[in-house]
């Protein structure tokens, strides 16, 4: 199972970016999916999460500005980031609890992480 994140970049304060993360492999389904941010010298923190049923949660700092969504048929989770601020700068990592068939054909659950995509917001 692999998660591939994309969509980061350099943007001015007030701008927008859309992150995408695609899960690949012999996937049965993705349970909870989410995005985490890690700024230099800081711990990785949850930004937003979404359940398989579409229930969302957000960090207080991004409520009203960010929106997480998913397309289950495409094994993809998105993060729409609007009105970006310099404090949103960091590497963004997608995460998913992936249910997939192993080589023996048995269903297993893996907590998978993407490689991170860098978001830089200039003031």
Image: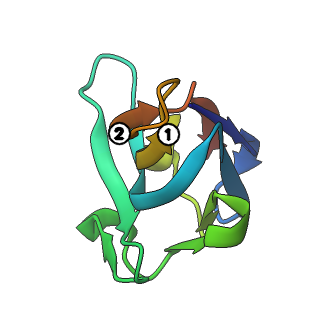
Q: Earlier in the sequence, mark 1 or mark 2?
A: 1
**Percent x, y of residue 9:** 75, 38
Q: Is residue 86 above or below residue 104?
A: below
Which of 62/27 is in front? 27
Q: Is residue 47 left or right of residue 104?
A: left
Q: Is residue 62 left or right of residue 102?
A: left
Name the residue furthest top: 41
Residue drawn where x is 68% and y is 47% of the image: 22
Residue drawn where x is 50% and y is 39% of the image: 101
**Percent x, y of residue 100:** 48, 43
> Which quadrant of the view contains residue 84?
bottom right
**Percent x, y of residue 16:** 71, 64
**Percent x, y of residue 80:** 63, 68
Residue drawn where x is 62% and y is 38% of the image: 119
Whether residue 82 is visible: no
Q: Is residue 32 left or right of residue 73?
A: left
Task: Please tell me how crowded label 1 is: few (under 14), some (14-19), or many (20+) other residues with Cα within 10 Å.
Answer: some
Estimate the spatial distance between the alpha carbons at disc 1 and disc 2, rounded to whole Å.
6 Å
Query: What residue is pinned by disc 1?
Result: 101
> Which quadrant of the view contains residue 74?
bottom right
Whether residue 108 is visible: yes
Task: Please tell me how crowded label 2 is: few (under 14), some (14-19), or many (20+) other residues with Cα within 10 Å.
Answer: few
Count of numbered badges drawn on the protein: 2
Which of 78/100 is in front? 100
Q: Answer whether labels 1 and 2 touch (C-beta < 8 Å).
A: yes
Q: Is residue 29 left or right of residue 15?
A: left
Secondary element at tag 2: strand
Query: What residue is pinned by disc 2?
Result: 108
Q: Is residue 90 above or below residue 75?
A: above
């Amino acid at each position: 199972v692999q998660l591939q994140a994309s969509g980061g970049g350099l943007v001015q304060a007030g701008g927008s970016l859309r992150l995408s993360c695609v899960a690949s492999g012999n996937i049965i389904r993705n349970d909870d999916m989410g995005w985490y941010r890690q700024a230099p010298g800081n711990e990785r923190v949850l930004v937003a999460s979404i359940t398989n049923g579409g229930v969302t949660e957000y960090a207080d700092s991004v409520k009203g500005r960010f929106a997480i969504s998913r397309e289950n048929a495409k094994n993809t989770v998105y993060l729409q980031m609007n009105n970006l601020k310099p404090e949103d700068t960091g590497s963004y990592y997608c995460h998913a609890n992936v249910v997939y068939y192993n080589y023996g054909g048995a269903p297993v659950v893996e907590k998978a992480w993407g490689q991170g995509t860098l978001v830089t917001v200039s003031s």
